[in-house]
Image (cartoon, grey):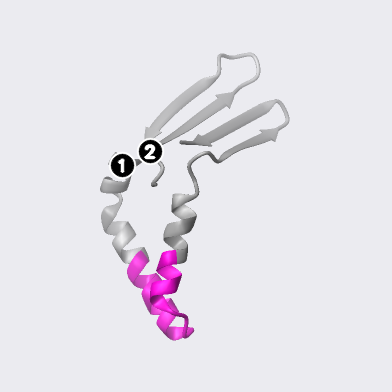
């Protein structure tokens, strides 16, 4: 299953935290032309380095499908960023 929502929370010192919800599908539709170019470049790279195109694209899709449930925190000094993929 493809990720549906990315939540970003920025904890700032001495201020209210910022929280953003980014729906993946509308962003993916806006970036579709770029995605097509990246996939074509990946296919050319697979052919140049003699890697199975179908297996490489399948592995990439499995990585994207495994993203829901991923969460990571970044802290730098007193600033903290939490990113959660649902």
Tell me what residue is drawn at x 40 percent, y 71 percent.
42
Q: Residues within 10 Å of mark 1 (few under 14, many from 20)?
A: few
Tell me what residue is drawn at x 32 percent, y 65 percent.
37
Q: Residues within 10 Å of mark 2 (few under 14, many from 20)?
A: some
Residue 14 percent coordinates (x, y): 64, 14
The circle on residue 75 is none
**Residue 8 falls left or right of residue 4:** right
Up/down of 67 relative to 44, above or below? above
- Count of marks placed on residues: 2
Residue 29 percent coordinates (x, y): 26, 47
Q: Pointers 1 and 2 in contact (CB under 8 A)?
A: yes
Tell me what residue is drawn at x 28 percent, y 54 percent.
32
Mark 2 secondary-structure assignment: loop
Residue 58 percent coordinates (x, y): 42, 66
Q: Earlier in the sequence, mark 1 or mark 2?
A: 2
Tell me what residue is drawn at x 39 percent, y 47 percent.
1
Residue 78 percent coordinates (x, y): 70, 25
Query: Of 23 and 53, which appears nearest the observer?
Result: 53
Query: Of 33 and 86, which appears nearest the observer?
Result: 86
Residue where numbered disc 1 is placed? 25
Residue where numbered disc 2 is placed? 4
Residue 54 colored in magenta in the image: yes
Q: What is the C-alpha distance between the residues marked 1 and 2?
A: 7 Å
Q: Residue furthest front?
A: 1
Q: Residue furthest right?
A: 77
Mark 1 secondary-structure assignment: helix
Query: To which quarter of the image does residue 52 belong?
Result: bottom left
**Residue 86 falls left or right of residue 41:** right
Up/down of 27 relative to 65, above or below? above
Stretch in magenta: 39-58
Up/down of 16 relative to 60, above or below? above
Magenta span main SS: helix
């Amino acid at each position: 299953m493809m990720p549906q929502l990315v939540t970003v929370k920025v904890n700032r010192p001495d201020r209210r935290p910022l929280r953003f919800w980014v729906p993946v599908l509308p962003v993916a539709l806006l970036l579709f032309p770029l995605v097509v170019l990246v996939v074509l470049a990946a296919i050319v790279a697979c052919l140049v380095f003699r890697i199975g195109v179908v297996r490489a694209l399948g592995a990439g899709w499995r990585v994207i499908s495994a993203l829901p449930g991923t969460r990571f925190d970044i802290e730098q000094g007193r600033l903290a960023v939490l990113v959660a993929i649902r």
